[in-house]
Amino acid sequence: MGKSIAIIQSNYIPWKGYFDIIRMVDEFMLFDEAQYTRRDWRNRNKIKTPQGPQWLTIPVQVKGKFHQRIDETLVSDHAWIDDHLKSIKHNYARAGAFKEVYPLVENLYHSVSHTARLSDVNLTLLRGLSDLIGIQTPLTWSTDYQSVEGKTDRLISLCQQAGADEYLSGPSARSYMDEALFQSAGIKLTYIDYSGYPEYAQIHPPFDHGVSLLDLLLNVGIADAPRYLLTDLRALHQSEA
């Protein structure tokens, strides 16, 4: 029986599509050896408000650290936890599942109150949110494996070291992925298809699919949340390579 894997940089409280990739693979590898990029998804994400989407951003140390890796990036001020919880509470207090979900979210946030590395904050939140919606996929670090030079060569080597024969990628990677290298290595390259997500009763219209998973959980509750992920776990596009 084959093994599938995804290799992606860690994100802060990501959108539902990120969690669909986690649940579609046998191992989800965090590629935080990549360079940290500002104004990206590593340390921020969006929630809904009556005024529209709002960014929640973890403050990190970046001054003079132009080439630091994601796993070298440190939180600069832990007051962000209370700030983010206040924003979540203020904007979702009237959401349908607030009373059920918010205490769990609050406990999860407090569990990273003394966590220094952004990568570790993200990992803890990813594991906690995955647990809430029943995702049991192991989350690992790419740095647990031997390093190989070359962007695509590195991905293929990680697949091989992890014993995977299928690599699941987001659709945007199709524009730069060297599919022939995967084919020659005997690894099936598959792209997830994000179309077809059902809408749910979002407290602050108009509907927006691209906000944090927290929005889904707080609006519909833990039991119903999986219904609004991709219903077909093989809703994928096979590479023609």
Image: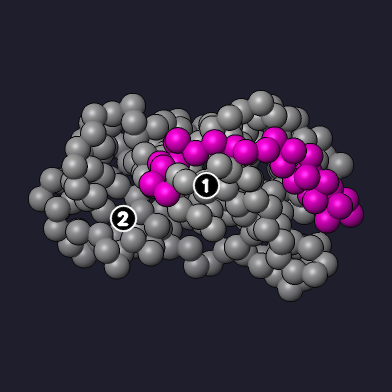
Q: Quadrant of the N terminus?
A: top left
Expressed as whole percent of the image width and height from the top left, the position of residue 157 reads 20, 38
Q: Which of the 4 image quarters holds residue 211?
A: bottom right
The answer to which of marks 1 and 2 sits earlier in the sequence is 1
Q: Which of the 4 image quarters holds residue 200?
A: bottom right
Which of labels 1 and 2 is toward the front?
1
Amino acid at dot 1: Lys
Q: Quadrant of the C terminus?
A: bottom left
Residue ID for mark 1: 63
Q: Residue at x 33, y 41 (%)?
A: 4
| Disc 1 + disc 2, Cβ < 8 Å | no
Expressed as whole percent of the image width and height from the top left, the position of residue 77 reads 68, 38
Amino acid at dot 2: Thr
Q: Which residue appears farthest toward the bottom when viewing the image?
A: 206
Which disc number belongs to residue 234? none
Left or right of residue 192, residue 19 in this image: right
Expressed as whole percent of the image width and height from the top left, the position of residue 137 reads 47, 34
Q: What secondary structure is marked by label 2?
A: strand
Q: Which residue appears farthest toward the right when viewing the image?
A: 94
Residue ID for mark 2: 190
Expressed as whole percent of the image width and height from the top left, the position of residue 30 reads 42, 39
Could you tell me how far apart the alpha carbons at marks 1 and 2 are, in whole angstroms? Answer: 38 Å
Please state the extent of the stretch shown in magenta in the rendering: 66-95
Q: Would you say residue 18 sits in the magenta stretch?
A: no
35 is higher (above) or lower (below) than 132? below
Frontmost residue, 222 versus 54? 54
Q: Residue at x 66, y 67 (%)?
A: 208
